[in-house]
Amino acid sequence: MARPNNEFLMAWSSLLGTDSAPGWQTIAIPSAGPLQIRAGRRSPDNAEAVLVGFPSAQLAAADKLPEGQGFAVERADPDGSGKLWLVLTRKISGSAELFAAMTCDVIGALDDRAAVSADETKLLRLLVSRIGAWQEFMRKGTQALSYEAELGLIGELTLLRAIIDAGVPAELAIALWVGPLDGIQDFELGTGALEVKTTLSTTGFLAKIGSLQQLDDAIRQPLFVAGLRLRQTSSGQNLPATVEAIRLIVKNNAEAERILAERLLAAGYIDAHADRYTRRFEQAGMRVIEVSNGFPRLTSGNAPAGIIKAMYEIDLDKAPGESVGVEGALKKLGAI
């Protein structure tokens, strides 16, 4: 669980100064297990920072640290001890509000993992991977999701819930969810995949296909498309409620919670934007069909010579084939 942001905001406020000599001003913050946590500012730029100290864990010299548009991560040695300190610092161009949210999320993730007796090495990996997820969030933009992206994420989470309900362990199901990581399909299972498309339309089902590879079963097989039809209602679930339902499923499973949090960040979802997602939806139907001969698509194998990239639309309602349902697809994929 994310820490309250006033813990860091008060510390940063108390460290405001005009010292022009290079160096650190820091205040100790309650630790996450064996780690040392400090809120700080670095002179002379006076940028907000959080410092995480590791008593014995080390990074290899060649390890590359993530860096986002609004923050930087670097090694430091604020007290000359020679121990590893990683410092997360806000860039001048970065949003102070968003940096505070990021800090609270990252340190909260360390708290949760330390509470189940994770060792320093695991905490170090968690810190780097969580910051990497924020890096992906910053790369894709820091605003609330567009209406189209909101609908798409609800579709992916609905299919994720269906995969878990069908019997795939939650931790594994979330790990298979690669859409937020720019996977070609939304879920990769063994040699096959599941792609979900979502619509509010009551007639026709226009689905955007992002590449020649997305519906190419020569790359991943078997390949299924789940067409999810939603309707907007006052009694349905909004995006935050959909997220919370998945969180409750994985509660107390530290690894599943970690992967879910990082996938949500990579998908562009943060809790700070929750009040902007007011639309409520309920499921009006789902058709899961296998992509095979006769399915309307463009691939590298059937596109005219010279076409190397393409984005196009198809009407899923006109795609041939009987719906096998989520369970039928998972059985053929060998997941259940």
Image (cartoon, rainbow, N blue to C red):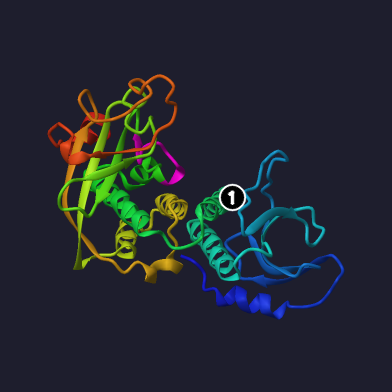
Which residue appears farthest toward the right when viewing the image? 21
Q: Position of residue 207 (x, y in %)?
A: 28, 43
Q: Which residue is depicted at the point 80% across and 57% down?
A: 81
Q: Is residue 103 above or below residue 139?
A: below
Q: Is residue 212 above or below residue 183?
A: above
For numbered disc 1, what is the local secondary structure? Answer: helix
Q: Quadrant of residue 43?
A: bottom right
Q: Magenta span covers which residues? A: 180-188
Q: Quadrant of the C terminus?
A: top left
**Does residue 31 appear in the picture of this structure?**
yes
| Lateral position of residue 280 relative to residue 135, left or right | left
243 relative position to 229: left or right: right
For residue 114, side relative to residue 50 (left or right): left
Q: Which of 253/194 is in front?
A: 194
Answer few, some or many: residues within 10 Å of disc 1's Cα (few below 14, many 20 plus, some between 14 and 19): some
Say whether residue 183 is magenta. yes
Closer to the camera in the image, 161 or 224:
224
Residue at the limit of the structure toward the left, as seen here: 322
Query: What residue would you read off at disc 1?
Result: 128
Q: Is residue 93 above or below residue 331?
A: below
**Residue 299: percent from the left, percent from the top?**
35, 26
**Mark 1: amino acid:** Val
- Any magenta on residue 206? no
Most foreground residue, 23 or 287:
287
